[in-house]
Image (cartoon, helix red, strand yellow):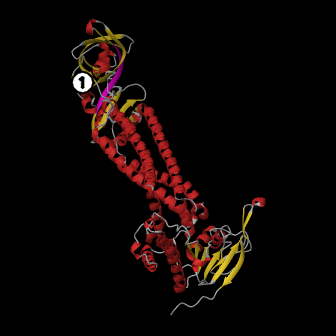
């Protein structure tokens, strides 16, 4: 796919003939310098924006020609987001933030809350379930965001510089959590970052430069210790 | 609807100032409408009450042309045969010129409306006798009760003697001396403050109209039978050219101007409520702006445009509902208070406050409609935000 902003001589080609596949259960990094088009690419994959040319398929569903409400439904059911600035709703508590995607899909509140609390336990935040989201530390908020992203068991979790606002310790904790969930739940992650090293072993690294895919590296990750 | 309502309430109550402002704006609008309605309808009902008590009774029977002769007794007898009729009494009006020498000067008043009443029957059909503030009501021929303003012009008091001149049926002057036995005054001025009252026989004698009656006042034990009596009278005396009016019909000319004023004031009130709704639109647009980032997050998570609109329209519904409930409660309390306080303007006309729960409810529900309507445009703006741009909003 390609993405052009603006028209005529004032237009900018943010992405050019980007073409790759992500397989179920992969942990994929998209790396590049600032302005390389990583965020634009993530917005395309997350159906937050439309490509100018080309197609995007998510879990077998061709998303490019969908209406706004169909794209919203696909995001609701198939995609989870982890943002650099966490993007939690400060008016809601921790558990309410996590269960929100479930409520959007029509799940009853009681069951949604139970599942949210279990998931918060998995990410180490059981004691904070009833706190207001804005009362947590950065690392804790990002773990809430991870739980929220996973609650609907999406086909794909997208991370937009998820460690960008965290200190090194918190960054390591969040990365370890994501990789743990990737291995245990076979959850597919696509994460954009400008620092590939902190993520360690992954399945695929896609390097973006000037809006084009410069390189795709696939790795056979070592099996986890028994 | 569950999570949308929860989100609507959370987003709304986070900014308590905006929430209070919008509810208050609508509630004030409702209270203005209710207050106007209570006061001005109270004025109209008070006027109607006084007209009934002093001038028209519950039913006013007259002739379309001319006056009753001896058939007035027949009509009175027919009317009083119904168990729901309390009493009926005749009246005859004329115009008089009066003078007195009160205060050692000749005081003259021209063209004073005079009402002739049956002093035995009239107290059964009207409260005119209760308006005598000084002295007493009529008992016999040769006595006169002056309205307060007429007495003031004549400088007459109870006990004075005045000359009264009328024009008889032959066009001749007819002059007679009268003893002033009472001065009449009413708070609303709708009684006989500008008139004079004498016996009907005195009016008949001075105007050489023996046995004539101009109007028959009828008072009902149960006013709900007014239309029934009217129908029966019109049917029974179809050939007699009767003009039978209920109190509302008889008072319509007096009330027409007031009703127009009430309608205008109510219109002003509704425009005020409309203005309140524009204030709500402005405040809700500000709320959308302050929640831009949250809207972007919701859209990124998969909330559809439709659901974003529902959330903000629910906010309008909540605002309108709270304003409606508060307005209904406050309007009811105001009406009950005004009823118990026997409100009047500066000791004048005592208002007849009528609490209409249906009108109060309707006005309050109008707030719900306005709250929702005011939310539509802000909801539309919110739903159109692009999630990527919205999430960058600080």
Q: Is residue A179 visible?
A: yes
Q: Where residue B279 sits in the image (x, y, percent)?
A: 50, 47
- Asked whether B118 falls inside the magenta stretch, the response is no
Compare residues B381 and B262 and report the one nearer the observer.
B381
Looking at the rendering, which quadrant does residue B292 occupy? bottom right
Compared across the picture, whether B13 is left or right of A214 comes to left
Of helix, strand and loop, which one carries label 1?
strand
Residue where numbered disc 1 is placed: B133
In this view, which residue lies farthest toward the bottom? A226
Q: Could you tell me which chain the residue with mark 1 belongs to?
A: B
Q: Main secondary structure of the magenta part?
A: strand
Count of labels shown?
A: 1
- Residue at image point 39% right, 39% down: B41
Compared across the picture, whether B75 is left or right of A94 comes to left
- Give, as a single range, the part of the protein colored magenta: B88-97
Q: Is residue B97 above or below residue B46?
A: above
């Amino acid at each position: 796919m390609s993405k052009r902003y603006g028209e005529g001589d004032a237009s900018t080609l943010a992405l050019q003939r980007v073409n790759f596949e992500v397989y179920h259960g992969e942990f994929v990094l998209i790396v590049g310098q600032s302005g390389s088009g990583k965020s634009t690419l993530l917005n395309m994959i997350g159906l937050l924006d439309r490509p100018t040319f080309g197609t995007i398929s998510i879990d077998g569903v061709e998303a490019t020609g969908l209406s706004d409400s169909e794209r919203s439904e696909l995001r609701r059911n198939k995609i989870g987001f982890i943002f650099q600035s966490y993007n939690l709703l400060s008016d809601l508590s921790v558990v309410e933030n996590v269960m929100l995607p479930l409520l959007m899909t029509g799940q009853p509140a009681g069951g949604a809350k139970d599942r949210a609390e279990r998931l918060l336990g998995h990410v180490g935040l059981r004691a904070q379930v009833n706190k207001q989201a804005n009362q947590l530390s950065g690392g804790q908020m990002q773990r809430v965001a991870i739980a929220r992203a996973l609650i609907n068991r999406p086909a794909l979790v997208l991370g937009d510089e998820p460690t960008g606002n965290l200190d090194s310790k918190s960054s390591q904790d969040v990365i370890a959590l994501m990789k743990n969930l990737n291995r245990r739940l076979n959850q597919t992650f696509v994460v954009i970052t400008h620092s590939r090293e902190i993520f360690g072993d992954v399945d695929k690294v896609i390097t973006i430069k000037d809006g084009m895919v410069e390189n795709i590296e696939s790795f056979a990750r070592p099996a986890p210790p028994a | 609807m569950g999570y949308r309502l929860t989100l609507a309430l959370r987003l709304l109550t986070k900014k308590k100032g905006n929430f209070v402002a919008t509810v208050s704006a609508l509630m004030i609008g409702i209270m203005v409408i209710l207050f106007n309605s209570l006061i001005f309808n109270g004025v109209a009902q008070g006027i109607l009450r006084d007209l009934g008590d002093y001038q028209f009774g519950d039913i006013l029977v007259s002739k379309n042309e001319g006056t009753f002769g001896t058939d007035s007794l027949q009509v009175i007898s027919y009317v009083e045969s119904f168990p729901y009729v309390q009493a009926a009494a005749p009246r005859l009006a004329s115009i008089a010129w009066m003078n007195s020498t009160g205060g050692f000067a000749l005081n003259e008043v021209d063209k004073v409306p005079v009402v002739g009443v049956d002093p035995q029957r009239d107290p059964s059909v009207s409260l005119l006798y209760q308006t005598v503030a000084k002295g007493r009501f009529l008992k016999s021929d040769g006595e006169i009760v002056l309205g307060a303003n007429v007495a003031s012009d004549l400088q007459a008091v109870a006990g004075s003697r005045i000359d009264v001149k009328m024009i008889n049926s032959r066009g001749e002057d007819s002059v007679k001396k009268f003893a002033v036995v009472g001065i009449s005054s009413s708070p609303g001025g709708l009684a006989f403050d500008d008139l004079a009252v004498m016996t009907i026989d005195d009016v008949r004698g001075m105007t050489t109209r023996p046995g004539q009656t101009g109007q028959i006042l009828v008072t009902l034990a149960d006013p709900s039978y007014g239309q029934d009596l009217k129908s029966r009278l019109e049917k029974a005396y179809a050939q007699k050219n009767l003009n039978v009016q209920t109190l509302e019909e008889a008072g319509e000319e007096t009330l027409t101007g007031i009703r127009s004023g009430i309608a205008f004031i109510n219109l002003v009130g509704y425009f005020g409520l409309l203005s309140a709704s524009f204030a709500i639109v402005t405040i809700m647009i500000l709320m959308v702006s302050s929640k831009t980032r949250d809207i972007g997050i919701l859209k990124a998570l998969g909330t559809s445009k439709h659901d974003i609109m529902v959330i903000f329209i629910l906010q309008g519904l909540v605002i309108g509902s709270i304003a409606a409930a508060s307005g209904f409660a406050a309007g009811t309390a105001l009406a009950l208070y005004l009823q118990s306080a026997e409100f009047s303007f500066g000791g004048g006309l005592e208002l007849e406050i009528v609490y209409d729960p249906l009108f109060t409810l309707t006005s309050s529900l109008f707030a719900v409609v306005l709250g929702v309507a005011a939310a539509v445009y802000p909801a539309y703006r919110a739903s159109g935000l692009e999630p990527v741009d919205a999430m960058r909003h600080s």
